[in-house]
Amino acid sequence: MRHEVLFSGFGGQGIILSAVILGRAAAIYDKKYAVQTQVYGPEARGGASMSAVVIDDEEILYPEVSNPDIFVIMSQQGYEKYGMDSSDDAVMILDSGLVFSRPKCKNLPVPATEEAKRLTGRVIVANIIMLGAVVSSTGVVSREAIEKAVLDSVPKGTEDLNIKALNAGFELGINGGKLL
């Protein structure tokens, strides 16, 4: 089954890294096909940034995201630029402390940035919390695959911090609320 996942937020939140990790989890550990794309530019300085992943059980012939079925939105500006036109049957995971609009599609508010501060004292792992919530609420990749991909992707010495954040995201995705 093809999934098109669009990540958006502002520069510095790890939006591109999140997409890379999800693509790695799908391709290397879940043995699916995956293609990751990203937008560079002024986004790196705080503007709305975007990265996307196409995941499929079959070979991917068209690598661009044209109709995302999963959105991961970590800023209001990212929502306004990339999430406002979501289809009714999409799923949107929102950082509830930074995105104030509520889309027409099914959505899951996740307090990722607030939880990152509370849990670790560092907002830098909010994107990893969001990845955990995405995986536990959508099943787009397996938990085992995302855990291995996170460990492969984060700087040495930060593995425990990032796994703690990922586990918090798993819980928020399962117990933190229902898709609205």
Image (cartoon, rainbow, N blue to C red):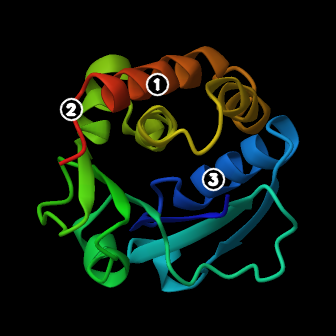
Q: How packed is label 1: few (under 14 Cα within 10 Å), some, or many (20 or more)? A: many
The N terminus: image quadrant: bottom right
Per the image, the residue denoted by label 1 is: 165
Q: Residue at x 33, y 58 (%)?
A: 92
> Closer to the camera: disc 3 or disc 2?
2
Residue toward you, 150 or 160: 150
Q: Is residue 52 left or right of residue 119?
A: right
Q: Secondary structure at mark 3?
A: helix
Q: Secondary structure at mark 2?
A: loop
Q: Residue at x 36, y 58 (%)?
A: 91
Residue 17, disc: 3
Q: Could you tell me if the residues under marks 2 and 1 are in contact, i.e. CB atoms within 8 Å?
A: no
How far apart are the alpha carbons under marks 2 and 1?
17 Å
Q: Position of residue 155 (x, y in %)?
A: 71, 33
Q: Is residue 171 visible?
A: yes
Q: Earlier in the sequence, mark 1 or mark 3?
A: 3
Q: How packed is label 3: few (under 14 Cα within 10 Å), some, or many (20 or more)? A: some
Residue 177, disc: 2
